[in-house]
Every structure is written in structure tokens, then in C-alpha cells.
């Protein structure tokens, strides 16, 4: 089978190399979302009205993978970002190798309730190249984002969070965060943010061109240690995978100190057979994927 | 609120129970008193008293089981019907696998005539709590705005509205008592430890096609055959018997999408253009309230391929105006949408629903 001819370049998208991100100029940011389906493409592949939809979905998947990776690499629970809008991009599909996607997208703060800091932009902007390889287990991501919050400020916030976390009573008596009604106690918010940070690593590795993950709930805390300055956090979360609608329990173990790279190990449970599986590990048929990143 | 069914085996137990019921601060309500010792007593226990009552029963050695969990929605349906007796009535259309009643609210301004009708479906996936919540808010909105709002008044002058707020009652109870993230029905699958089928893959529209699974343990298990789930069959039978539905809207969460057929194929539906235009207008009306943005398109390319879905069945059975709403949010809270977003969600969705219903009303076929 012939590999699909790449779609014609989208007007306005630059050359292949990673584009240096210019300082924010508000007007230029607000580009209309682009959909790539071209007439010639449809003629060659009849009955593919999903081209436009497929392009859009691929760009969104790439943006998500890039953002998970970005959040993990930034290692900053006070500066987590979520996808606002995909602005433009282009995808190449090679059935033998995989999917390569260039994408530009806007982001917003993860914590919608928190007030914007002085000098902080509401929307950030990122550009990324993401490679969903057929062979490799995780998407290769190259991503650059505008700085939406000053580095010094971010470090201050992280350190504040760190101090709050060190104050928390040990052992942590957690039932679930959020609770079943979506409520997160403000005093527990730092734990949630840290859990989300660790989960970003997991979600980055697991995101493919087809599957996308969302963090649903922190269901248990096995260990919360704060000796020798770092925070040592062993916990279980539930992830929701949208295309299969499955709920996936993942046990995550992270070590964090503000400013230092995040260390994460995890194990996610595959399709649960007993429907009562709620984050316990017994009976998992999948070999544990212990991955550390340093 | 829960209903406790308490087994009383002798006079001693009856007096213990009376002691409990008569204590004022617990606000208990006896539904069915025992006439003989062998019959159980049904007692309505408000949420705030659940813990003390459970402790009491256990410590006194009284056997009990919790029957209907969280009656709030059924109560409210009843209240609406009695507050607006000339407009609304609560109709039982069937029962669930675990024998819970399936109630719809029928809004009609003229009895004895089978008018062109609108079906509003909610809660088919039990964990999507914003769906049931939005539906019950909408029910009261329809009733209270009749003869106040020209749009809904005009709609009800020509059409009936049927609203099913809890299309999957067993699943809903399960999310309240055992597993907040339960999606499917609670039917048993012979030969499998896994329970339930995805009621939105169980309709007879390319049943067992792509976007569904034949594995009972999957969240999108389509079931052994189309309409195998009694909850689905009840709706199908009702709509087919009625024979005059023009619009079918299914409420889900999350993702903020407004979709029309098809899910089971990428082929364009014959009315795709009209449905797309209408959906865009509805999404715009919805966004006008709080700026909440919805994406619009056919199911298969907007979210994913899905066979055996409710709106595909409705559409292929002559119900042209078939839409799915995936309500708030886009993943921040997902299924666990905080309660303070219920009313804002319901209010904006109402404008979207009205846009669609108005169009149907003016384009009856």
C-alpha cells in the first residue's frame, strides 16, 4: 500500500525546523483553527470525509502528548497547563513508521480557580513536534512554550507549595481527591497538583495518536514521606481513556523537590477483569513497567 | 436519602424500631408499617441521618437492606407533576434489570392526542452525573416557563415533550453506593465475572459494528444482542408504539460536543447539512450564556466511531432531529464536575435545547 501523500502545507505554517517562539504579540496568536482536508486528497482516497476530522484529531492528540511532556519536564506543580486550543499544524502519516505531527497550540492554567498573577498572561503558546512511532512505546516530543509565568515567581510558588506539603500531617488520611462530587479541599490542593504532575509523566508515555487520557481521581496514598528534604509520594490515581472509555488505575511513585527534575515510576493496570478493581494490583496480567527517567 | 427495608422478627424488634422512628431529630419516615412480624418495614432515612441509623440498627441486631438509593430525582419528578398537574405527568415506561422503575415526565398541553413529540434522554451512562442533574433541572424549567416564555409555550402548543432523566437507574444507584465511575447497566453476563453492557452500544443501529466491544468486561460492551438491555428496550418499545416522535436528544458528559448521526459510519447522514447548521446555532446560543464552547459535528469524526448508539437508532427510525450533547467540561474535572457548575451547565444547555426544539416545532414533517 502506498503511504499517504502528505497533505499540502497549511498556509502560514513555517518550514520544518522548530520555530523559535517570538515574544507574545497578542494579535498574531489568535489564528483561526485550521482544518486540512484538500480536494485532491479526497479524490485520491474516495470516501474519506473524515480527513478533516482525522487531521484535527491528530493535531489535538499531538498537542496533548506535548503538553503532558511539558508539564512533566517543567516539574512544577504550581505551573501546570492544560490545552486551550489547537491553532495550526500539519501531520504526516507513514504506515510503516508512524505519525509525525507539527502543532501550535494555546494553553491555560490548570487550576481554573486560582487568580491570575500580576504580569501573567491568561493564554500561553506552545509549538511542538511530536512523533508517534509505531515501534517506540512513547511519543517523542520536542516542545517549546512561551513563558507565561516568570521563572522566579514559579520557583517561589513551588517552594510555597513544598512548604505547605511538608506541614501536612503524616500519615495522610486520604479517601479520594476530588471527592465524588468534584470537591477538592483547599488544604489538599497541593497534593492534587503534585499527583497531577506525576500523572503527566504517565499520560505522556501512554498517549498515542488514538488514545487520550485524563486524570480522574486520586484514590489512595500509600506513602507520603518528607524526610531528607524531598517529597516521596506513592499513590494511586484513576485515569480515563476516552476512546475505550476505560478507567485505568495507576500506581505512581514520585520524588520531588522544587527546581529539581521529577523522578517517576509507575505501573498501570490493564483492562480489569473483575469489575470491582479499584486500584489494587493483584491479578494484573501485565508485566510492571518500571521506568525511571534519570 | 435512602430507603431502609428492615426485617422485624418479633415484638421486641418492633419496639426497638419504634424507638428509632419516634426520635425526632432523625426525621425518619415510615413508608410501610408492619402488619405482621414477617413483613419488612420500609423507612425513609434522610442523608443526614444515615450514619446514626445504620449504627443503631447494627448495634440492636436489626437486619436491614438499603433499597432505593437517592430518591431525590424520582421525588422531584413527582413534585413537578403535582406542582403542574395540567402540564406534567410522571409515566412509568418500564423497569431496569434490578427492577427499578423507569420514569419519564410527559409534558403535554392536550390529552388524548398523539402529538408530534420530543424525547429528552439523560443518564444512560450512570457516571455522567451532570446529565441526570441537567435533565431534572430542565424538567422544572419546562414546566415553570410554560406560559411565561413564548418559545417553550409555542413548542408545547404543538408538541409533547418526554423527559427521561435516569435512563440507567441501576447504574446510577451503583455510582452512588459502590463505584462512582460505573458506566454500564448492571445486567449479569452468563459465563463472565463482568457485569453490565454499555446501553449506548445496545441499540439496533449497526449493532456490534465498530466502536463497540464483544468483551463483557469492556466499558463499551454492546451486549449479547440489540435491545438486550431492558432499559434500552423500554425506551425503544415506548417510542415505536407512540410512533410520532420527531426529535431525540441524548445528554452525556464530558467533552463539550454537540453531535448528530452517524456514529456507526463515517458516511454523511442525508440530513447532515441541516443538522449541522442547527447544531451550530444551538452551540452558539449555548455559548452566549457563559462562553462555554462546544465543538459540532457527526459523532464518528467528532468524538469516535460508535455503533449501536441511541441517536443513530432514532435517526434511522425516522426521527430526523437526533442529537447528542456531551456536556461540561473538557477534562479538568471530567465526570466529577463540581456541584457549583450544575446550574450554569443546565442554564446554558437549556438555550441549546430550546434552539433545537424551536426549529423542530417550525419544521414539522
Image: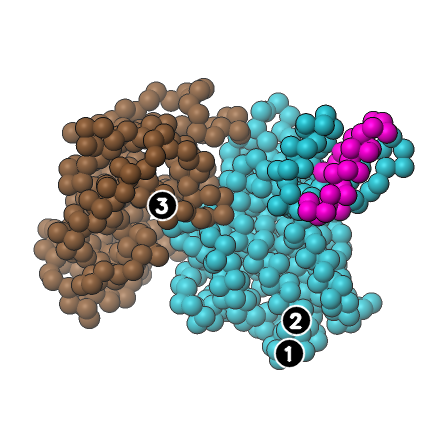
Chain colours: A brown, B cyan
The region drawn magenta spans: B4-29
Q: Disc 2 on helix, strand or loop? A: helix
Badge 3 vs badge 2, beta-carbon distance below 8 Å: no
The quarter of the picture where residue A193 lies is top left
Badge 2 vs badge 1, beta-carbon distance below 8 Å: yes
| Parent chain of label 3 | A
Where B191 falls versus B350 (above or below)? above
For disc 3, the neighbor class at 10 Å (few under 14, some 14 to 19, many from 20) is: few
Quadrant containing the N terminus of chain A is top left
| Residue B240 visible to the viewer | no
The image's mark for residue A187 is: 3
Badge 1 vs badge 3, beta-carbon distance below 8 Å: no
Q: Which residue is mark 2?
A: B144
Mark 3–mark 2 Cα distance, whole angstroms, equals 41 Å
Q: Mark 1 vs mark 3: same chain?
A: no
Mark 2–mark 1 Cα distance, whole angstroms, equals 8 Å
Between A137 and B98, the one nearer to me in the picture? B98
| Residue A24 visible to the viewer | yes
User: Residue B352 placed where, x, y %?
Assistant: 51, 67
Q: Which residue does the image show at 57% across and 45% down from the upper left?
A: B126
- Say whether residue B153 is left or right of residue A108: right
Mark 1–mark 3 Cα distance, whole angstroms, equals 45 Å
User: Residue B314 placed where, x, y %?
Assistant: 62, 55
Q: Disc 3 on helix, strand or loop? A: helix
The image's mark for residue B148 is: 1
Q: Which residue does the image show at 44% across and 48% down from the upper left?
A: A183
| Parent chain of label 1 | B
Magenta span includes B156: no
Magenta span includes B8: yes
The quarter of the picture where residue A115 lies is bottom left
- Say whether residue B181 is left or right of residue A118: right
Amino acid at each position: 500500500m502506498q503511504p499517504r501523500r502528505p497533505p499540502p502545507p497549511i498556509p502560514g505554517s513555517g518550514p520544518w525546523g522548530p520555530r523559535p517562539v517570538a515574544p507574545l504579540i497578542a494579535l498574531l496568536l489568535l489564528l483561526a483553527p485550521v482544518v486540512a482536508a484538500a480536494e485532491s486528497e479526497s479524490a485520491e482516497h474516495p470516501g474519506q470525509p473524515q480527513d478533516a476530522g482525522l487531521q484535527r484529531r491528530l493535531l489535538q492528540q499531538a498537542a496533548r502528548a506535548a503538553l503532558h511532556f511539558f508539564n512533566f519536564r517543567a516539574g512544577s506543580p504550581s505551573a501546570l497547563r492544560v490545552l486551550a486550543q489547537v491553532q495550526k499544524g500539519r501531520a504526516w502519516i507513514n504506515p510503516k513508521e508512524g505519525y509525525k505531527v507539527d502543532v501550535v497550540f494555546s494553553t491555560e492554567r490548570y487550576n481554573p480557580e486560582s487568580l491570575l498573577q500580576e504580569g501573567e498572561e491568561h493564554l500561553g503558546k506552545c509549538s511542538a513536534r511530536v512523533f508517534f512511532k509505531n515501534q517506540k512505546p512513547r511519543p517523542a516530543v520536542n516542545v517549546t512554550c512561551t513563558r507565561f509565568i516568570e521563572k522566579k515567581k514559579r520557583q517561589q510558588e513551588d517552594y510555597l507549595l513544598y512548604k505547605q506539603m511538608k506541614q501536612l500531617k503524616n500519615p495522610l488520611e486520604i479517601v479520594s481527591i476530588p471527592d465524588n462530587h468534584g470537591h477538592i479541599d483547599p488544604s489538599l490542593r497541593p497534593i492534587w497538583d503534585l499527583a497531577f504532575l506525576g500523572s503527566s509523566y504517565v499520560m505522556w508515555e501512554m498517549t498515542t495518536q488514538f488514545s487520550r487520557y485524563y486524570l480522574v481521581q486520586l484514590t489512595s496514598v500509600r506513602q507520603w514521606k518528607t524526610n531528607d528534604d524531598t517529597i516521596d509520594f506513592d499513590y494511586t490515581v484513576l485515569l480515563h481513556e476516552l476512546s475505550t472509555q476505560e478507567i485505568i488505575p495507576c500506581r505512581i511513585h514520585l520524588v520531588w523537590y522544587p527546581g529539581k527534575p521529577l523522578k517517576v515510576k509507575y505501573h498501570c493496570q490493564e483492562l480489569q477483569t473483575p469489575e470491582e478493581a479499584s486500584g489494587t494490583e493483584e491479578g494484573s496480567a501485565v508485566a510492571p513497567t518500571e521506568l525511571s527517567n534519570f | 436519602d435512602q430507603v431502609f427495608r428492615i426485617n422485624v422478627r418479633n415484638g421486641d424488634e418492633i419496639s426497638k424500631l419504634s424507638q428509632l422512628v419516634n426520635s425526632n431529630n432523625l426525621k425518619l419516615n415510615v413508608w410501610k408499617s408492619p402488619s405482621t412480624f414477617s413483613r419488612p418495614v420500609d423507612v425513609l432515612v434522610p442523608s443526614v441521618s444515615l450514619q446514626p441509623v445504620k449504627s443503631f440498627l447494627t448495634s440492636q441486631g436489626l437486619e436491614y437492606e438499603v433499597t432505593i438509593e437517592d430518591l431525590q430525582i424520582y421525588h422531584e419528578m413527582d413534585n413537578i407533576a403535582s406542582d403542574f398537574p395540567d402540564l406534567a405527568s410522571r409515566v412509568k415506561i418500564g423497569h431496569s434489570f434490578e427492577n427499578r422503575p423507569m420514569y419519564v415526565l410527559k409534558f403535554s398541553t392536550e390529552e388524548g392526542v398523539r402529538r408530534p413529540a420530543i424525547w429528552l434522554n439523560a443518564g444512560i451512562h450512570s457516571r455522567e452525573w451532570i446529565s441526570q442533574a441537567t435533565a431534572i433541572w430542565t424538567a422544572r424549567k419546562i414546566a415553570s416557563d410554560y406560559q411565561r416564555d413564548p418559545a417553550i409555550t409555542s413548542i408545547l402548543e404543538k408538541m409533547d415533550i418526554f423527559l427521561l432523566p435516569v435512563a440507567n437507574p441501576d447504574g446510577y444507584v451503583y455510582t452512588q453506593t459502590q463505584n462512582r465511575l460505573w458506566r454500564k447497566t448492571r445486567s449479569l453476563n452468563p459465563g463472565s465475572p463482568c457485569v453490565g453492557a454499555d446501553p449506548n452500544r445496545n441499540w439496533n443501529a449497526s449493532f456490534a459494528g465498530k466502536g463497540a466491544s464483544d468483551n463483557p468486561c469492556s466499558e463499551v460492551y454492546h451486549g449479547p444482542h440489540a435491545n438486550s438491555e431492558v432499559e434500552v428496550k423500554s425506551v425503544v418499545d415506548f417510542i415505536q408504539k407512540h410512533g410520532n416522535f420527531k426529535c431525540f436528544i441524548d445528554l452525556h458528559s464530558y467533552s463539550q460536543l454537540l453531535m448528530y448521526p452517524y456514529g456507526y459510519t463515517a458516511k454523511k447522514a442525508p440530513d447532515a447539512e441541516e443538522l449541522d447548521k442547527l447544531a451550530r446555532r444551538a452551540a452558539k446560543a449555548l455559548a452566549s450564556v457563559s462562553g462555554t464552547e462546544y465543538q459540532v459535528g457527526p459523532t464518528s469524526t467528532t468524538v469516535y466511531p460508535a455503533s449501536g448508539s441511541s441517536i443513530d437508532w432514532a435517526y434511522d427510525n425516522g426521527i430526523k432531529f437526533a442529537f447528542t450533547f456531551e456536556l461540561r467540561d473538557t477534562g479538568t474535572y471530567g465526570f466529577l464536575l463540581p456541584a457549583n457548575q450544575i446550574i450554569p451547565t443546565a442554564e446554558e444547555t437549556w438555550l441549546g435545547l430550546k434552539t433545537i426544539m424551536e426549529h423542530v416545532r417550525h419544521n414539522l414533517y
